[in-house]
Amino acid sequence: NEADMAKIAATLTGVGGAVWNDDCVEIYLKPGHRALCHFAANTLGGRFMRGASDSWQSVAKRSDDGWTIEVALPFSAMQEPAPLPGEIWGANFCREEKPHREDSCWSLPGFNDESGLGDLVFE
């Protein structure tokens, strides 16, 4: 929830820009022994990726008191086959909230720090 949606930072559209300068979500995935894949999306549909192709999608929805982003990341975007049951990938899911300078992550220390990735276990 956002008390004042007018303060949400949202300037970038398209693909490849520094969406982390806006209010956004960032996803970090490290399949097996590969390099870290980084995906980011903001509330205007701006997207960034590193270590992956542009075959993923995001859809942002804004309301009077908040915003959400839905992301579809096919394994093929990371040039990976579907993981086997029990396979473990490193992962982190982060959010940047600019009006209050609030950053939050699922796993600490956060963002692209590979030493702090959580375990994503496939079933």
Image (spheres, helix red, strand yellow):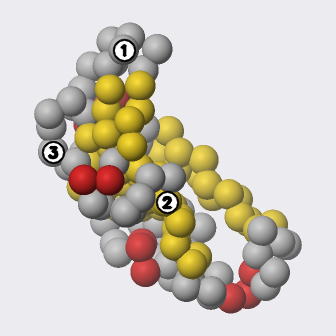
Report x, y in % for residue 12. Answer: 46, 77
Give SS at disc 1.
loop
In percent of width and height, residue 57 lies at 47, 45
Residue 111 appears in the figure: yes
- Give the residue at mark 3: 35
SS class of the residue under badge 2? strand
Binning the other alpha carbons within 10 Å of mark 3 as few (below 14), some (14 to 19) or many (20 upward) gives some
Q: Residues within 10 Å of mark 2 (few under 14, many from 20)?
A: some
Question: Would you place residue 98 above or below residue 36 in this image?
Answer: below
Q: Which of disc 2 and disc 3 is earlier in sequence?
A: 3
Q: Position of residue 47 (x, y in %)?
A: 42, 61
Residue type, numbered disc 2: Cys
Residue 116 is left or right of residue 94, and the answer is: left
Can you identify the residue that label 1 sits on? 86
Please tell me whether mark 3 sits on a helix, a strand or a loop.
loop
Residue located at (38% from left, 36% from top): 119
In front: mark 3 or mark 2? Answer: 2
Q: CA distance from mark 1 to mark 3?
A: 20 Å
Which labelled disc corresponds to residue 51?
none
Q: Earlier in the sequence, mark 1 or mark 3?
A: 3
Which percent across, then down, holds residue 53?
26, 44
- Between 22 and 121, the one nearer to me in the picture: 121
Q: Which residue is mark 2?
A: 105
The amino acid type, in three-letter code, at marker 3 is Ala
33 is higher (above) or lower (below) than 106: above
